């Protein structure tokens, strides 16, 4: 078991209606994913590592990362990314540590 590392979580996915797959020319088959990365310590998420995107065609299984996405898919990716927020549970470790420190500080006065 690793004590620290990175993990990913799919934040949102959507099948784009307007995008046509450049490889197989199929409409309504490209699914765009927004994937969040978080850093963990003993499997407890501490920090957000950002977001990135991928797309996959359900017909021909062609996978595109953000660097090699065609412009039509990239536009759908950026539209989807605007609606996605980083989840609060990506920071749950920091929240717990801050709460414990505050409890320790205020326990001396009460």
Image (tube, helix red, strand yellow):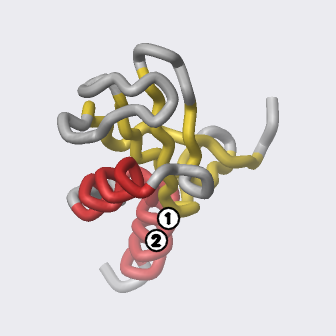
Q: Which residue lies at the image location 32% right of the left edge and 58% below the top edge?
A: 75
Instruction: Classify 10 Å Cα crowding around label 1: few (below 14), some (14-19), many (20 and above).
Output: some
Position above or below: 2 against 83: above
Residue 47 visible in the shown view: no
Disc assigned to residue 98: 2
Position above or below: 89 against 58: below
* Pair 1/2: label in front: 1
Q: Quadrant of the N terminus?
A: top right
Q: Quadrant of the C terminus?
A: bottom left
Residue 39 visible in the shown view: yes
Q: Which residue lies at the image location 40% right of the left edge and 67% below the top edge?
A: 99
- Image location of residue 67, percent across then percent down: 61, 57
Disc assigned to residue 94: 1
Q: Which residue lies at the image location 20% right of the left edge and 40% below the top edge?
A: 18
Q: Is 34 displayed left or right of 8 in the figure?
A: left
Mark 2, secondary structure of its residue: helix
Does the residue at mark 1 contact the one at mark 2 (Cβ under 8 Å)? yes
Q: How many marks?
A: 2
- Image location of residue 42, percent across then percent down: 68, 42
Residue that extends furthest to the top in the rendered view of this protein: 59
- Image location of residue 96, percent across then percent down: 45, 59
Instruction: Classify 10 Å Cα crowding around label 2: few (below 14), some (14-19), many (20 and above).
Output: few
Q: Is 70 displayed left or right of 65 in the figure?
A: left
Q: Quadrant of residue 10?
A: top left
How far apart are the two marked residues, 1 and 2, measured between alpha carbons?
A: 6 Å
- Image location of residue 7, percent across then percent down: 62, 42
Disc assigned to residue 73: none
Position above or below: 33 against 29: below
Residue that extends furthest to the front in the rendered view of this protein: 25
């Amino acid at each position: 078991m690793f004590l620290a590392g990175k993990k990913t979580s799919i934040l949102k996915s959507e099948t784009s209606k307007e995008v046509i797959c450049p490889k197989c020319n199929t409409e309504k088959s490209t699914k765009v994913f927004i994937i969040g990365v978080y850093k963990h310590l003993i499997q407890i998420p501490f920090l957000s590592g950002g977001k990135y995107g991928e797309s996959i065609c359900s017909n021909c299984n062609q996978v595109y990362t953000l660097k090699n996405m065609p412009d039509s898919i990239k536009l759908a990716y950026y539209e989807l990314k605007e609606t996605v927020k980083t989840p609060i549970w990506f920071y749950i470790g920091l929240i717990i540590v801050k709460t414990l420190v505050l409890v320790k500080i205020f326990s001396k006065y009460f």
